[in-house]
Amino acid sequence: MNDLMTKSFTSYVDLKKEAMKDLEAGPEYDLQMSGTQMDRNLGLFLEEAEKVKQEMGLIREILGRLHEANEESKSLHKPEALKSLRNRINADIIGVQKKARAIKSQLEEMDRANAANMRLSGYKEGTPVYRTRAAVTNGLRKKLKELMMDFQGLRQRMMTEYKETVGRRYFTVTGEYPDEEVIEKIISNGEGGEEFLGRAIQEHGRGKVLETVVEIQDRHDAAKEIEKSLLELHQVFLDMAIMVEAQGEQMDDIEHHVMNAAQYVKDGTKNLKTAKDYQRSSRKCMCLGVILLLILILIVVIPIATSFSNS
């Protein structure tokens, strides 16, 4: 956690320095926009972004715990142990759902703040502040998308490994490896049907078979409950992905912002050149005016001086 906070603070400071550097290097902005105002505006936004990053970091920690719990489940056979693990996994998933919904609300608020900010002088599209806010927001969305894909991968992995475990338990009581159809039948009802039970009891005795069937049933219940929770979580992530699309943002379109920045600098350079040309033209006109004035003075003064001299 300390490492996460350190990295977050470092990135916050770096982003702010980069934005200030852009501001100093670029063309002049509205003189009413002070550096302090810009720093405060961007600073508050980056603090909110860091909070979102920290929440995502906590979700990734929970993801790691879920992977560990999935590995642990492979070696458990007792109903009490399986039930305890199932409850622990579901508690973690519920925690992720709450954090994901909170992140969704925070990103929506950041979108509204970005839209409102663009209407302020000095923060319009193409300015360093705008580019920084857009880059940070899209970066958070990219991390969110990666998290969504990781949880989707966990869900698929858990289901695949559940099928493998069922296959091994089936082999334990029958001595045969089941085909895909048999495994799907066992998964669908948690038992495997009368044919499986009857043949297994005849060959291995009722006690051992019933113990295995109970384990399969417990694993079935756990898998279905966890699958349901993960699907609900996936739906939350999908809603957030839809929100991103609705805002018209392009998560990986860094080139879009680079082009805007380049265009902004190009426009600033063009305006600066125009100002210099205008200044040069003004000086030229002033010189011509002075010369004409001197000529006019000479035209008027010389005859007068000559007439006085003759007198």
Image (cartoon, rainbow, N blue to C red):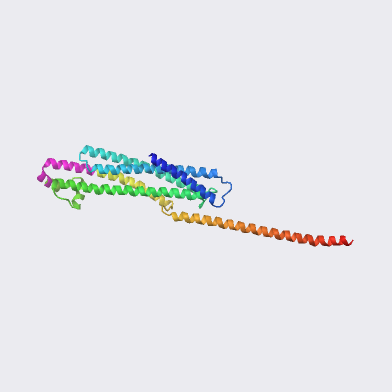
Start and end of the magenta stretch? 199-221
Return the x and y of residue 278 as percentages of the image width and height: 63, 58
Q: Residue lying furthest front in this view?
A: 309
- Name the one closer to the observer, 232 or 295: 295
Residue at the image position 87 percent from the left and 61 percent from the top: 309
* Magenta part, dominant SS: helix
Residue drawn at the location 11% of the way across and 47% of the way down: 199
Q: Position of residue 19 (x, y in %)?
A: 50, 48
- Rendering coords of residue 100 (x, y %): 37, 44
Left or right: residue 221 versus residue 286 is left
- Res. 118 in view: no
Q: Is residue 111 left or right of residue 88?
A: right
Left or right: 18 with respect to 295? left
Q: Is residue 195 magenta?
A: no
Q: Position of residue 142 (x, y in %)?
A: 39, 50
Quadrant (top left, top right, bottom left, bottom right) of the C terminus: bottom right
Position of residue 158 relative to residue 307, above or below, is above
Q: Which residue is located at x 84 percent, y 60 percent?
A: 305
For residue 192, side relative to residue 146 (left or right):
left
